[in-house]
Amino acid sequence: MRILLVEDDKNLNFSLKYSLEQEKFDVDSCFDGEEALYYIEETPYDLILLDRMLPVRDGISVLKQLRKDGVNTPVILLTALGEVNDKITGLDCGADDYLVKPFDLQELCARIRTILRRPAQLSPLKALTFADLSFTSESLTLTGPTGACTLSRREGALLESFLRRPNQPLSRQQLLLKVWGPDSDVEEGNLDNYMYFLRRRLRSVGSRARLVTVRSVGYRLEE
Amino acid sequence: MRILLVEDDKNLNFSLKYSLEQEKFDVDSCFDGEEALYYIEETPYDLILLDRMLPVRDGISVLKQLRKDGVNTPVILLTALGEVNDKITGLDCGADDYLVKPFDLQELCARIRTILRRPAQLSPLKALTFADLSFTSESLTLTGPTGACTLSRREGALLESFLRRPNQPLSRQQLLLKVWGPDSDVEEGNLDNYMYFLRRRLRSVGSRARLVTVRSVGYRLEE
DNA sequence: ATCCTCTACCAGCAAAATGCGCATGAGAAA
DNA sequence: TTTCTCATGCGCATTTTGCTGGTAGAGGAT
């Protein structure tokens, strides 16, 4: 079970992370709200432990953003505030539980178990869109004006990179890293290959979006 | 939203019932554990507010009984005890939340909303349907246009996963998790096997529903 | 400007790897 | 026994990959 711990107090962060790992949870931790959003975008967590007071972007704002984006990963808010009103706003913003510091570690674990016990509700598959394109990474389905098709896994991962950063040039290095992972040693030519595949796909669904090459840099998705 | 309130203190029972009704909840109330079980058997509640100390049969025992019977209606335990250990046992017995008296009414309401917000877990008794199919998980009976048949337990569990999320691709991982449980280590090939069985079943009852494979992802039930 | 060269990129092919369907048989449970 | 569950194995289709020959564009020399 993958848990993301967001807590700016370094001591508490480390000790909590350690304790949860003792309980056989798989814990990533970070220290501010923006970082949290970045982590969450990258990894599908089963649970998020979210401190309410955070630098850069506070917990409630992170929570609201997540729910707005359709991410419904369970969230337990952690907080030093004990006011009833805070609890209520916290819960009504979409938190699944609310613990006031200092809390007992065993109680936290019990509440985590309680939440993880229930069937994980998969977030409704979110489609990425750009121009006349729509792509669901779950089902690897690409839809355009004249039809739809199913991409292979690599094609999907590659297209997703572009859809997440539309109009922005992505370097070959970035793409290789994202699509093939940091410790893969595929030939670079492979990327060319997949760009070719993707372009064919775009044409086949009749999209007017283009993958233009930025010579000696990389590629960019534009309309 | 139908709520069952189980609380032996008459004053608290009445005032809580009244307050919750003000909040537009549909509240039944009763005063001891046996009564509670009786009510629950009769009516499908969306939530149960369960006092821990009750005459005849205490809250924890009621809760255990329910879970043993496969009733997974959410339960919030209410209690005068504040010991951490009590919370932990309560939660680990299958409660969804735990409030210590005296609690704030608004906080209770917020926690109720939190629990009701998530998709109601279908009671396993009801028949699941999709397209021209109907399946009762209790009797493992699958009915289609040209006939009916009885599935094995695994087949049933697997089909149920699909019927609960029609048209949505389910990953092999999700399916293994749902059907075989989190700590089983069956070979993946087994899943292929059961997909094959299920497809045969669908054909045998003449359904036009199809289990399509989404390569490198999983499967999807569609019409 | 024209030509040349060099590099980065494109297109396609064919071999290798992988994912999946289906069959069979052994063991467990009913 | 019969039924259910599971592992294993083969074969097919798709995906992934490395490779090769060819093209386009940048920049320098003439």
Image (cartoon, coloured by chain):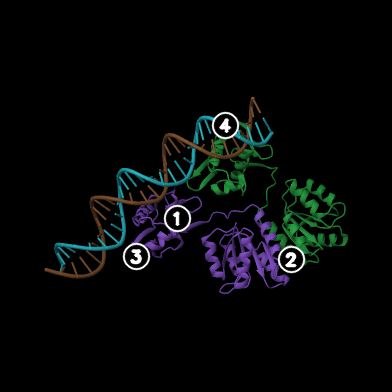
Chain colours: A purple, B green, C cyan, D brown
Task: Measure how far apart labels 3 and 4 are at the Cα level.
Answer: 57 Å
What residue sits 77% from the left and 52% below the top? B63
- Which callout, 2 or 4, points at the residue further toward the start of the chain? 2
Q: How many marks?
A: 4
Q: CA distance from mark 1 to mark 3?
A: 20 Å
| Tags 1 and 3 on a common chain | yes
Q: Residues within 10 Å of mark 1 (few under 14, many from 20)?
A: some
Chain bearing mark 3: A
Q: Residues within 10 Å of mark 2 (few under 14, many from 20)?
A: some
The residue that mark 3 highlights is: A217
Element type at mark 1: helix
Q: In terms of image quadrants, where is residue B5? A: bottom right
Q: Spatial distance from mark 3 to mark 2, Cα to Cα? A: 55 Å
| Distance (Cα) linking label 2 and label 4 | 53 Å
Q: Which of the chains bears the disc numbered 1? A: A
Element at badge 3?
loop
In the picture, residue A47 is in which quadrant?
A: bottom right
Per the image, the residue denoted by label 2 is B107
Rounded to the nearest angstrom, the CA distance separating label 4 from label 1 is 38 Å
Query: Comparing marks 3 and 2, which lies closer to the viewer?
Result: 3
Q: Which residue is mark 1?
A: A157
Q: Nearer the viewer, mark 1 or mark 2?
A: 1
Q: Badge 4 is on which residue?
A: B204
Q: Are marks 3 and 4 on the same chain?
A: no
Q: Amino acid at mark 3?
A: Val
